[in-house]
Image: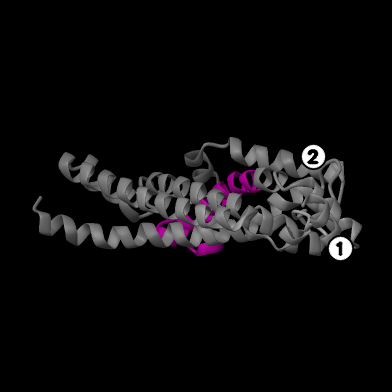
Amino acid sequence: MSWDQMSDLMWPATQETLQMVGVSTVCTVVIGLPIGVLLVLTAKGGALQNLPVNKVLGAVVNLARSLPFIILMIALISFTRLVSGSSLGWQAATVPLTVGAIPFFARLVETSVREVDRGLVEAVQAMGGSTWTLVRKTLVPEALAGIVASVTTTVIALIGYSAMAGTVGGGGLGDLAYRYGYLRFETAFMWIIVAEIAIIVTLIQLAGDYAVRRLANRGHGGGRTRLLRPRAATPTPDEDLVAS
């Protein structure tokens, strides 16, 4: 297979991969972020402490995380058809990709939010802040750097999932590598696709690391509650005289 033939096949497949990963990432963040925060709020000592709800939600998340993605895809074929109207193509692949990534991302968010300084949380509560205020102005802003790192990890995992989805008609680079690289014994072509996926993953990781560093330099994700942190005491005029 010539390079021109390869490039004609790779560009549409790359677009499909980026589209399915992009749509899945947006859906995963929109659904997984509230679940991760809710796991923290309903835990022991949380603002909405409710241990039964926390245990049930945690069990559902753990069960969904334990399923291998290829099995999850097959199990969701009927649901995928109901949502997207088909079980083939990149649009259909976004359904199992999203379902598989939500619990993974939710646990990462939970870990990031738990690391928020407990003193800041108690300060907001002592000032009469509601649960919504606590989430919007403290938990999420303070955990923002960790959440961005979680998004980066999730996107990279979705790229790997999308390659598996391609082997069962999901489209994208995985489908191309399987149909042309494996079934037609175009080994060189398959390794070129592998190299392209590695480049995409590396670029995403670099972009994510850069965003996390910027947020970390602003201080704990740039949260507004940094005003609540203790500041160095300013010496009074009398103290200056004593010191001199």
Q: What percent of the width, then of the height, locates residue 25?
A: 51, 57
Instruction: Point out the stretch of residues depicted in magenta.
Output: 83-109
Q: What percent of the width, then of the height, locates residue 12?
A: 28, 63
Q: Is residue 192 magenta?
A: no
Q: How is the image coloured?
A: one colour
Residue type indicated by callout 1: Gly
Residue type indicated by callout 2: Lys
Q: Which residue is mark 1?
A: 129
Front residue of this view, candidates 177 and 83: 177
**What main secondary structure does the magenta stretch of the protein show?**
helix
Against 15, residue 166 (above or below) is above
> Outermost residue, left direction?
2
> Outermost residue, front direction?
244
Front residue of this view, candidates 78 and 34: 34
Q: Residue at x 85, y 42 (%)?
A: 52
Circle number at residue 55: 2
Q: Is residue 100 magenta?
A: yes
In the image, which is nearer the foreground, mark 2 or mark 1? Answer: 1
Q: Is residue 239 left or right of residue 225?
A: right
